[in-house]
Image (cartoon, helix red, strand yellow):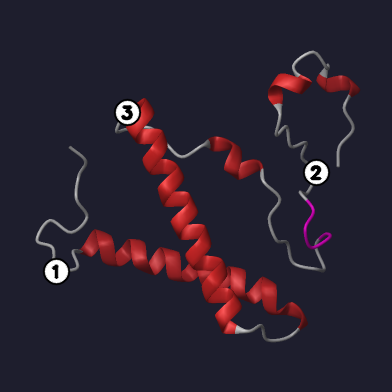
């Protein structure tokens, strides 16, 4: 059985509260990047974060049902392109990294033959 963040179902324990604060700070950082060119529609932002939270959780739920209760999130997610400050690099670029989304296709290609993005 998985450990519950809300064992009493109605109280916010310290760990859950701190996790919520961490998520709020991450959302603030993403919002700041999105609003470099001006304010965005908050309905769109709400749709975005709701979709991500739901997709992430449902994907992890399926993985844990198939592979076990301690299955971590898919590590490939860290390789997906992320927003960057405009002054640092292109907005949707992955800075200085090769992202291998299809390892079965690239397994016979030597890393020395790949060029950085």
Residue corresponding to mark 1? 11
Res. 78 mark: none
Indicate which label's residue lies in the foreground, 2 or 3: 3
Indicate which label's residue lies in the foreground, 1 or 2: 1
Q: Residue at x 28, y 67 (%)?
A: 17
In the picture, residue 47 is in which quadrant? bottom right
Res. 96 mark: 2
Residue corresponding to mark 3? 68
The reply to whether dot 2 and dot 3 touch (C-beta < 8 Å) is no
Residue 103 vertical placement versus 27 (above, below) = above
Find residue 87 and report its horizontal and vertical position in percent: 82, 68
User: Which SS class for mark 1?
Assistant: loop
Residue positioned most to the left: 8
Pick the residue in front: 80 or 84.
Answer: 80
The magenta stretch spans residue 100: no
The reply to whether dot 1 and dot 2 touch (C-beta < 8 Å) is no
Find residue 56 and report its horizontal and vertical position in percent: 47, 50
User: Which SS class for mark 3?
Assistant: loop
Lower position in the chain sequence, tag 1 or tag 2: 1
Lower position in the chain sequence, tag 3 or tag 1: 1
User: Magenta span covers which residues?
Assistant: 89-93
Q: Is residue 26 visible?
A: no
Circle 2 packing at 10 Å, graded few (<14), some (14-19), many (20+), is few
Circle 3 packing at 10 Å, graded few (<14), some (14-19), many (20+), is few
The reply to whether dot 3 and dot 1 touch (C-beta < 8 Å) is no
Quadrant containing the C terminus in the rendered view: top right
Q: CA distance from mark 2 to mark 3?
A: 34 Å
Quadrant containing the N terminus in the rendered view: top left
Residue 34 vertical placement versus 73 (above, below) = below
């Amino acid at each position: 059985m998985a450990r519950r963040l809300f064992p009493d179902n109605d109280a916010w324990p310290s760990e859950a509260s701190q996790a919520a604060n961490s998520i709020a700070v991450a959302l603030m950082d993403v919002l700041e990047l999105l609003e470099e060119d001006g304010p965005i529609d908050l309905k769109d932002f709400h749709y975005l974060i709701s979709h991500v939270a739901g997709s992430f959780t449902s994907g992890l739920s399926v993985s844990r049902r198939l592979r076990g209760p301690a299955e971590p999130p898919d590590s490939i997610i860290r390789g997906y392109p992320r927003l960057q400050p405009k002054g640092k690099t292109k907005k949707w670029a992955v800075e200085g990294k090769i992202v291998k989304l299809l390892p079965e296709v690239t397994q016979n290609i030597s890393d020395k033959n790949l060029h950085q993005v």
